[in-house]
Image: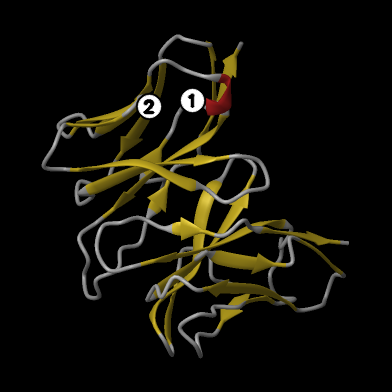
Amino acid sequence: DGGITQSPKYLFRKEGQNVTLSCEQNLNHDAMYWYRQDPGQGLRLIYYSQIVNDFQKGDIAEGYSVSREKKESFPLTVTSAQKNPTAFYLCASSIPGRYGYTFGSGTRLTVV
Amino acid sequence: DQQVKQNSPSLSVQEGRISILNCDYTNSMFDYFLWYKKYPAEGPTFLISISSIKDKNEDGRFTVFLNKSAKHLSLHIVPSQPGDSAVYFCAASVPSSGGSNYKLTFGKGTLLTVNP
């Protein structure tokens, strides 16, 4: 079955450490996105990529970095510069046109 | 500045009754709107969408209404079922400025609880 896989589902990080969240899709979608969900804040866009080797900042990119070396993969690195990294992170992908997104099941990151 | 607003954080209805979830937007460039449903610790799933050239779209128990002059849309669920209990997100997009993929702007969500 095609879909988006995010791993791990739960992740704990010590303050000051970088951590990378994985997102892999086998839907052959061109575009991929990273969102962050906080209680009462909805979904906020961190980064997005419309094509391999290209990506753009979203609304809250500070403290995050991404790469898009393969069409299937769009990993997100949460750096030590991110002041409040504890959140639920969602990866999504889409095809050209108005078809909405397919989301992964999310990764909950907790800084301890 | 929040461009997509869901002013009701929560809504509670009885099984079998109608659920009405509301969404307002401020960006007049939005021309496509979607509703997503999300269960705890899972990713959102697409429910229904509507283009700005329409004022209504229906899919089974779900109907979305769009009032462009008021910059308002609503999702009606009839009849409501306990399995509909989830967070519902309203989302909107503008015409693409370059590529053919569209960024979505989401509201904060409304938690719907359907009581048996």
Picture residue at 20% right of the left edge, 49% below the top: B31
Q: Where residue B100 sits: x, y (%)?
A: 24, 71
Task: Give the structural element (helix, strand or loop) at label 1.
Answer: loop
Residue B16 x/y as whole percent: 47, 10
Pointers 1 and 2 in contact (C-beta within 8 Å): yes
Residue occupied by mark 1: B8
Q: Which residue is drawn at 52% across and 64% down?
A: A1
Rendered location of residue B88, percent (x, y): 48, 35
**Dot 2 crowding, Cα within 10 Å, few <14, some 14–19, many 20+:** many
The answer for which chain carries disc 1 is B
Relative depth, front residue between B85 and B108:
B85
Chain letter, disc 2 residue: B
Per the rendering, the mark at residue A57 is none
Residue shown at 11% from the left, 42% from the top: B53
Q: In which quarter of the image is residue A23?
A: bottom right
Residue to which mark 2 is pinned: B22
- Residue type pointed to by label 2: Asn
